Image: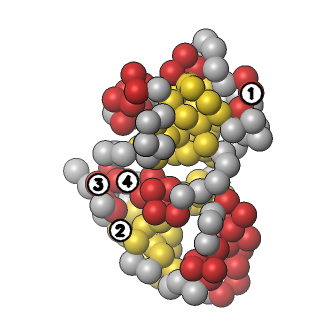
Amino acid sequence: MAMRIKSRHHLKGSEVKRILSAIEERIEDPDGLRKASMELAETDEGFEIIIVNGRPLLMIIDGEPFFTVLGAIELSPRGRTVVVDSGAVRFIANGADVMGPGIVQADPEIQTGDLVVVVEERHRKPLAVGRALRAGPEMKGEGKAVESIHHVGDRIWKSIC
């Protein structure tokens, strides 16, 4: 069952600038976003999704703007990526947290607590958005490395795609 939008409103210029300053260094074409129409939608489950030109590309996670999985697919963010092997894909696509043994590569700039995009190894397609539980250089190995927040096929995905 998909989530429902409780409220939706256009963002003021100052709000758009704040969001852009937080993410513009992470995307290839920030100028495209500067010219975009942005709305903030609040869901019945408390998620805040930023709709860019009618597409739900960003969300607010703990006060920080970051990509939805669709946003990561369309905007091709740079940095803060965790690459997983093909054996981990089905688990992550079903909402599992990312475990160290499934990680092939992690951006060395990632700090504990950072929001990250989890991508699959072969085509580098985004699978999930999560919070790093360890720094990038320490992600491989035993234990949980990334806590999943939003993944392909979840309620957020179903309500936006």
Q: Which mark is residue 158?
A: 3
Toward the top, the furthest residue is: 142
> In front: mark 2 or mark 3?
3
The image quadrant that residue 87 belongs to is top left
Q: Is the residue under label 4 in contact with that under label 3 (CB below 8 Å)?
A: yes
Amino acid type at mark 3 = Lys
Q: Earlier in the sequence, mark 2 or mark 1?
A: 2
Cα distance between the residues tagged 2 and 1: 39 Å
How crowded pointer 2 is (Cα within 10 Å; few <14, some 14-19, many 20+) is rated as some
Q: Nearer the viewer, residue 38 or 1?
A: 38
> In front: mark 1 or mark 4?
1
Q: Is residue 40 left or right of residue 131?
A: left
SS category of the residue bearing label 1: helix
Cα distance between the residues tagged 2 and 3: 12 Å
Q: Which mark is residue 5?
A: 2
How crowded pointer 4 is (Cα within 10 Å; few <14, some 14-19, many 20+) is rated as many
Instruction: Provide the residue designation for mark 4.
Output: 156
Q: Nearer the viewer, residue 1 or 31?
A: 31
Amino acid type at mark 4 = Ile
Q: Earlier in the sequence, mark 1 or mark 4?
A: 1
| Placement of 56 over or under 10, stated as above or below | above
Q: Is residue 154 left or right of residue 126?
A: left
Which residue is depicted at the point 34% across and 29% down?
90
Residue 147 visible in the shown view: no
